[in-house]
Image (cartoon, helix red, strand yellow):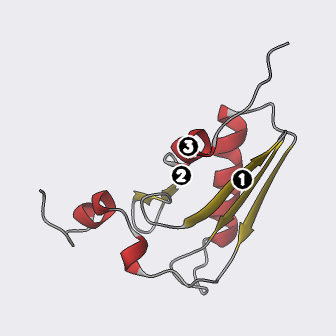
Amino acid sequence: MTQITATEEDIKNALHHVIDPEIGINIVDLGLVYKVAVHDKNIQILMTMTSPSCPLGLYLQGNVESAIREKFPYFQSIDVQLVWDPPWIPEMMSDAAKRQLGWKEES
């Protein structure tokens, strides 16, 4: 019997489709995804917001779960937790995100 699973990279690739509506960049490149763990048929994601006062926390949590369920419907549970430690800082963004925001020149 073939085991159906996904890697951390597979999950992060799916999360590239979750866009922060205020900034217009995906949450992975923004550096909002801190941890992805796959245990049997369960996924745990630790993520943050650019600010603890960001009103989009529940919205993005729901979008994260939807993106994973769409791509990997065989997982039993998807636990998406918002964490505030370490606090998000702009240096956590990928170079691609920094270029999109005009903070870094094309190389």
- Disc 3 marks a residue whose amino acid type is Glu
3D distance between C-alphas at marks 1 and 2: 18 Å
Instruction: Estimate the x, y position of residue 19 in percent, counting from the top left.
Output: 48, 55
Quarter location, residue 79: bottom right
Residue 40, given in percent of the width and then of the height, sits at: 84, 40
- The residue singled out by tag 2 in the image is 18
Give residue 87's mark.
none
Residue at image position (29%, 62%) is 95
In the visual, does 26 lie left or right of 66? left
Answer with left or right where residue 2 lies relative to residue 27. right
Crowding around mark 3 (Cα neighbors within 10 Å: few <14, some 14 to 19, many 20+) is few
Which residue corresponds to mark 1?
Answer: 37
Image-based side of 47 in relation to 24, left or right: right
Earlier along the polypeptide chain: callout 3 or callout 2? 3
Please tell me which residue lies in front, 11 or 49.
11
The amino acid at mark 1 is Ala
Q: Distance between the residues labelled 1 and 3?
A: 10 Å
Mark 3 → mark 2, Cα distance in angstroms: 15 Å
Which residue does the numbered mark 3 point to in the structure image? 9
Indicate the quadrant where residue 35 lies. bottom right
Q: At numbered mark 3, what does the secondary structure look like: helix, strand or loop?
A: helix
From the viewer's perspective, is 102 left or right of 7? left
